[in-house]
Amino acid sequence: MSGTAPSDPLPQLPGIRRGGQHLLEREPPAEFVEEWTQALARPETTAPGETLALLIFRIGAEWLALDVRFLVEVAVMRVIRRVPERTNRMLLGLVNIRGELQPCVALAELLGIETAGPAERLLIVGDPPRQWAFAVDEVAGVERLPAQGMGNIPSTVAHSLAHFSQGILGWEDKRVGYLNADTVFAALRERIG
């Protein structure tokens, strides 16, 4: 007995090596080649142009979007600690996000949206150098939507929401208000401090 182990176990199984090599070197079926030739010859279904990476969420009955660059995280609702003599309808209080206290705001109040009950999620968004926690009802996720699909804000939209929106986008079967993050953050800094 020599005491040395073989360096390659495959030489002991030459049939496996030949079978794998045969699989990789075989001719593809004619229908496979034809299918991929047709698939690659088709024009792209999306028109060229700028796309927007957006976080889509719902407050009350309104679907809204925010540029994903401002998203820090999505969290489940946490205990909101009231701030004595500072808490109001817009500033709900402070929430603990991984050991740091963040101001939790009712974005619905700022945008003039009616809500039916307590929010279920928190969006933590960055407004360098600070962060805000927005109380929202539902988070759909991040979507890429074509910028050329953005329409003007209809006159039927509430004035507050129209003031903070850049336009309306179609997503699935819904109309989504694309929020202007700079305007929203400026209003929060002015009203809450």
Image (cartoon, rainbow, N blue to C red):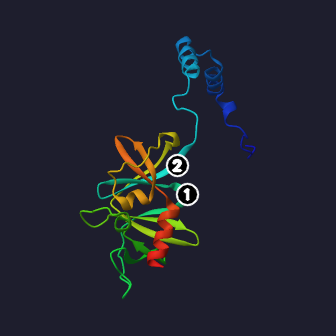
Q: Which residue is mark 1?
A: 69
Residue at 37% across, 48% down: 154
In this rendered view, identify the residue nearer to me: 75 or 160. Answer: 160
Location of the N terminus by quadrant is top right
Q: Earlier in the sequence, mark 1 or mark 2?
A: 2
Q: Residue furthest left?
A: 116
Q: Amino acid at mark 1?
A: Arg
Locate residue 47, reporting x and y percent: 54, 32
Q: Is residue 71 visible in the rendered structure shown here?
A: no
Left or right position of 2 against 133: right
Q: Residue furthest top?
A: 30
- Element assignment for label 2: strand
Residue at 58% across, 19% down: 41
Q: Residue furthest front?
A: 155
Locate residue 187, reporting x and y percent: 46, 70
Left or right position of 127 against 20: left
Locate residue 36, reporting x and y percent: 56, 20
Answer above or below: position of 73 versus 23: below
Q: Is residue 148 visible in the rendered structure shown here?
A: yes
Q: Which residue is mark 2?
A: 53
Answer above or below: position of 146 versus 64: above
